[in-house]
Amino acid sequence: MNRYRVKKRVFSFLKAFMLLLLVVIIAFPFWQLIVSSMLDTNAIISYPPKFWPSGGSLSNYTEVLKMQGGAYLRWMLNSIFVAGSNTVLVVLVASMAGYAFAKRKFPGSRVLFNVVVATQIIPSVTTLIPLFLIVSKLGWVNTYKSLIFPGVASAFGVYMMTQFMKDIPDSLLEAAKIDGCSNYGTFFKIVLPITVPQLSLLAIFNFTQQWGSLTWPLITVNETMMKTLPLGIASMKDLNGTLTGTIMAASMISFIPLLIAFIFASDKFIEGMTLGAVKG
């Protein structure tokens, strides 16, 4: 019995140690970002490296907020607007398409769904030039339209919502139909409220992806005040020279909207992840 308890305690200790080590590995780069954002460039590149912001200040943050007459704040507003608008449209389109594929069978629906899923294996970089040519022909270069609309048709979102909506009982939809609900009424009054956790999960995934997008804005936007945060931060070295500390501070501030979004949607996010795990 004592031997069993010893083994159990050793196992518990090893498990706690491994979890702690994992947390340190994940959190260390973020901590180093915080430290670097409070130091000047010389202190950041000095050896040995600093792991504590001794002698640091918040001057990098004030420099970021004052740069180019508020360019950074404009980049943040651009990112919030673009990522938010795109996410709303992606969630709406994916949920409607998922509902149609899962519950409203039509001729060729299975083939069309397989085609949509198959598009996920196509590297996104191969579609950049054709997509840019389309955007250019439409006159959308250097506009919000070029940043919002091209990513609205999300194959991953359609696939994800289709799988979740297959679990909605048909009897519930039939009862709504008997009560006089139209297809749109059933979708907006019955289906959407049921799938709020899954919609929140998709929204957070998509918002995070759009927030960190760099390649597409780099191709379609070249005006300073139209840039999104990733593109703006990447161009800071060209605007003000190599100001590593300022760039670190700018990167640090860029986490704030993501953190706020996750805090407000964390319950639904975890619920959606749990339901997805149970389904899998």
Image: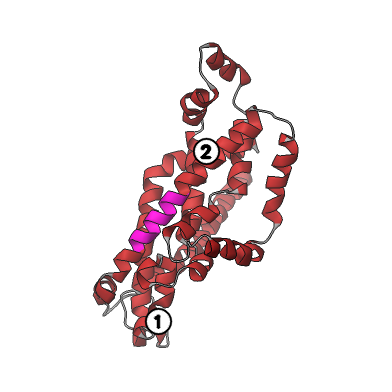
Q: Name the N-terminal-most of marks 1 and 2.
A: 2
- Write the residue at 63% across / 44% down: 4
* Mark 2 lies on residue: 198
Q: Position of residue 262 (x, y in %)?
A: 41, 49
Q: Please say whether residue 249 is visible from this viewpoint.
A: yes
User: Which region of the structure is painted magenta?
Assistant: 76-86
Return the residue nearer the eye: 188 or 34.
188
The residues bearing labels 1 and 2 have C-alpha atoms spaced at a distance of: 40 Å
- The numbered mark at residue 212 is none
Can I make out residue 275 in this image? no
Classify 211 as above or below 57: above
Q: In front of the other: label 1 or label 2?
A: 1
Q: Which residue is mark 1?
A: 237
Which is nearer the eye, 11 or 66?
66
User: Looking at numbered disc 2 in the image, what kind of residue is underneath it?
Assistant: Gln
Which amino acid, by three-letter code, is at mark 1? Lys
Return the x and y of residue 5 as percentages of the image width and height: 58, 45
